């Protein structure tokens, strides 16, 4: 293990954390000055039914806490990537050149998905706070966001299939499974599934801690596979997430919202395929899959059996409705996420 590789991973991560901490006061001032929060709390579920328990638990915070905190994440990552990329031009043939981690085969695509997805999410957030659009409380229609995710997924799959010559997935302990052209719809389906996990952004600190754990696991996988640029990129996202989390732990000063969630979930899909660790993704990112799964089960149970499985869906709100303090739900999900990330990373590395 070369020391330079360790430095290349950790120095940019610390830089992203520092940038995030520095820009947050400016962003916070802007968000509160212009009242960038929902004008009314959500009162309807995806199936059209009411959400009286959720409304009672969250009606005040949803209309007093700003959205768009995810700007800290992608803006910090963008600044750090640009800084270390530019540094090599000012100091060629020096140590600074070795710190650049922007490369065509490892980090171009995840950077594109992070910025592209985050900007689409930002548009949704702006519409939400203006209370316009087709969503329950404003914003882009769900169908529109799904189409955007599928489009990003199609572009990503095309890049893998044509530019990187990837048409198979690694099955732990069993070699590779060749998918051929089916790789493209499979890639899109995984991205859509992860995007649905964005509903984990429902409690103070919950999404930030879980995403930080997941990207840390993939940074480790990429590092031990020799994908140092990708490992550095994942570590930079972790640094930015920790800066966000510094201000998002209870009581949160802002929420991550769609500008963070959409960028992070689409990027995570790309990272999982780049590391050939997509099959262990449901283990490493278990909370992201459990949240929408609980929603689906709730809808099925209500529609076909006439009763609810959970007091509130998704799952983290169920525990909140049981009487768990929100910070206890968050911290226990952090612990679960860390255990799952370690298990999935171990399987990916030893298989």
Image (tube, helix red, strand yellow):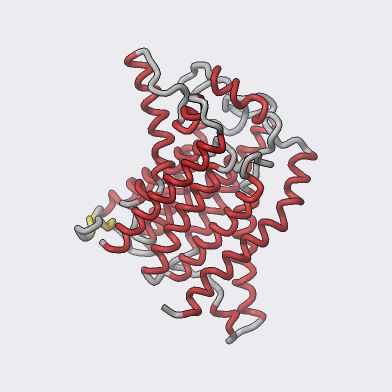
Specify the farthest residue to the right. Answer: 33
225 w.r.t. 182: above or below: below
Residue 47 position in % (x across, y down)? 46, 21
On the question of residue 121 being in view, the answer is no
Specify the farthest residue to the left. Answer: 174
Specify the farthest residue to the top. Answer: 306
Q: Which quadrant of the view contains residue 221?
A: bottom left
Q: Is residue 77 left or right of residue 288?
A: right
- Quadrant where the N terminus is found in the figure: bottom left
| Towards the viewer: 339 or 93 | 339
- Quadrant where the C terminus is found in the figure: bottom left
- Residue at horizontal 38 percent and vertical 49 percent from the top: 340
Residue 276 position in % (x across, y down)? 33, 59
- Residue at horizontal 64 percent and vertical 51 percent from the top: 246
- Residue at horizontal 35 percent and vertical 46 percent from the top: 282
Residue 144 position in % (x across, y down)? 51, 35
290 w.r.t. 310: above or below: below
Residue 153 position in % (x across, y down)? 43, 48
Q: Is residue 332 left or right of residue 93?
A: left
């Amino acid at each position: 293990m070369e020391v330079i590789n360790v430095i290349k991973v950790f120095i940019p991560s610390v830089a992203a954390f520092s940038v995030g901490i520095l820009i947050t006061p400016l962003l916070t001032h802007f968000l509160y000055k212009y009242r960038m929060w929902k004008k009314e709390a959500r009162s309807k579920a995806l199936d059209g039914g009411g959400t009286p328990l959720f409304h009672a638990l969250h009606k005040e915070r949803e209309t007093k806490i700003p959205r768009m905190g995810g700007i800290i994440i992608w803006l910090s990552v963008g600044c750090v990537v640009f800084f270390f990329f530019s540094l090599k031009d000012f100091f060629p043939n020096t140590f600074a050149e070795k710190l650049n981690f922007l490369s065509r085969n490892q980090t171009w695509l995840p950077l594109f998905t992070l910025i592209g997805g985050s900007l689409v999410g930002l548009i949704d957030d702006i519409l939400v706070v203006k209370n316009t659009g087709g969503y329950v409380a404003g914003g882009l229609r769900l169908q529109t966001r799904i189409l955007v995710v599928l489009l990003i997924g199609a572009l990503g799959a095309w890049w893998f299939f044509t530019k990187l010559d990837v048409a198979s997935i690694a099955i732990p302990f069993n070699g590779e499974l060749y998918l051929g052209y089916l790789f493209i719809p499979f890639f899109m389906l995984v991205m859509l599934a992860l995007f649905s996990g964005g509903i984990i952004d429902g409690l103070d600190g919950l999404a930030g801690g879980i995403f930080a754990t997941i990207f840390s696991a993939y940074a480790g996988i990429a590092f031990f596979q020799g994908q140092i640029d990708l490992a550095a990129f994942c570590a930079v996202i972790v640094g930015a997430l920790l800066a966000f989390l510094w201000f998002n732990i209870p009581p949160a000063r802002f929420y991550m919202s769609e500008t963070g969630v959409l960028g992070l979930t689409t990027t995570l899909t790309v990272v999982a395929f780049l590391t050939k660790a997509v099959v262990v993704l449901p283990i490493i990112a278990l909370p992201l899959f459990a949240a929408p799964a609980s929603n689906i089960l709730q809808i099925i149970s209500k529609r076909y059996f006439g009763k609810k499985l959970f007091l509130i869906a998704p799952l983290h709100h169920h525990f909140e409705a049981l009487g768990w303090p929100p910070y206890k739900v968050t911290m226990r999900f952090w612990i679960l996420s860390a255990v799952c990330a370690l298990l999935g990373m171990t399987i990916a590395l030893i298989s």
